[in-house]
Image (cartoon, rainbow, N blue to C red):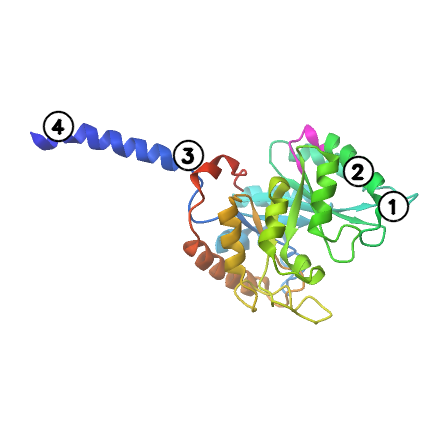
Amino acid sequence: MKNSRLFPIVALLAGICSQRAADLPPAATNPFFAFCMDVQDSKKRSLPEQAQLLKELGYDGAGHLWLANVPQRLQTLDAAGLKLVQITTIVDLTPGKPAYEPALKDILPLLKGRHVQIDLLINGLKPGDPSGEARAIEVMRELSDMAKDSGTEMLLYHHTGSWLDRIEDAVRLADKVNRPNVKVMFNLCHWLRVEKSRDYRAALKLALPRLGAVSISGAEESSDAPDWSGYIQPLGRGSFDVFGFLRTLRELGYTGPIGLQCYGLRGDARDYLAESMKAWRDYSARLPAWPPSNAALRHPTP
């Protein structure tokens, strides 16, 4: 008799707990995707083969480099039950040149409702040249307007050697553009190469109000290698504390997508993607849960 009276109460409490849990992001992980693996694979896998490999290994989606073959990328990822998280393209500030590829206008309607992000490398001038700022603001507002109907985000991608090569400059430009669909992406390998400081907490905290995505890789704390072998390695390798970096992101409440940077990795993509996924799962299992107050910040899951 006592058990029968307790049962409705227990069921009610379980339902409340389940509802609260459903309102929070999963405790384990941010959406995790891979990018540049399509140009760094000794097996030269086709788009369908890439999608199946990512699915098999447990990735949530993929990034796509440049504007060719976007419909095929969408089709193959859809078939695998994965998400196209990002497309990378270039903005050119060179006077007299078109600022972006005309094909971008044709691609944006294909992305409607998919919550895709467009990564923008901004080139054409020396890093930090102030003469490019007015033009960059003009172009970014134009792209923001173009992307609005599709629900696509435009991410300022700081990249070594580009006009926009520092996360601080990316945040300042995004603030001046002042559009809700213009955000920034924090790229660990480029930050390590460009910045002397290793205070990533301060950099991430600065970027957080505009932070749309983050890229990571295994890396050395410091490297003089002329190529990317010091700052782009399979996840889990190198002396840089990637887990500490991810823990800081979690503590700051960042819940958006995290991309595995694969540029420059050699050999069979299966090997470095599998190795990186193993490290990612280890990191994810040890991360603290998101603060409940940040649950509403969660980005759409790939």
Residue 208 position within the rendered picture, expressed as x and y whole percent measured from the top left? 60, 43
Residue 35 position within the rendered picture, expressed as x and y whole percent measured from the top left? 63, 53
Residue 37 position within the rendered picture, expressed as x and y whole percent measured from the top left? 63, 57
> Where 46 falls versus 233 (above or below)?
above
Name which residue type carries label 1.
Ser
Q: Which residues are magenta?
A: 147-153
Could you tell which of marks 3 and 2 lies nearer the N-terminus? Answer: 3
Residue behind mark 1: 131
Residue behind mark 2: 137
What is the spatial separation of the Cα atoms under label 3 and label 1, in whole angstroms? 46 Å
Could you tell which of marks 2 and 4 lies nearer the N-terminus? Answer: 4
Could you tell which of marks 3 and 1 lies nearer the N-terminus? Answer: 3
Q: Does the segment drawn in magenta span residue 45?
A: no
Of tags 4 and 1, which is closer to the observer?
A: 1
Q: Secondary structure at mark 3?
A: helix
Q: Residue at x 75, y 37 (%)?
A: 176
Quadrant holding the N terminus:
top left
Q: Answer yes or no: is residue 260 visible.
A: no
Residue behind mark 3: 23
Residue 193 position within the rendered picture, expressed as x and y whole percent measured from the top left? 69, 62
Could you tell which of marks 2 and 1 lies nearer the N-terminus? Answer: 1
Q: Pick the residue in front: 153 or 134.
A: 134
What is the spatial separation of the Cα atoms under label 4 and label 1, in whole angstroms? 75 Å
Residue behind mark 4: 5
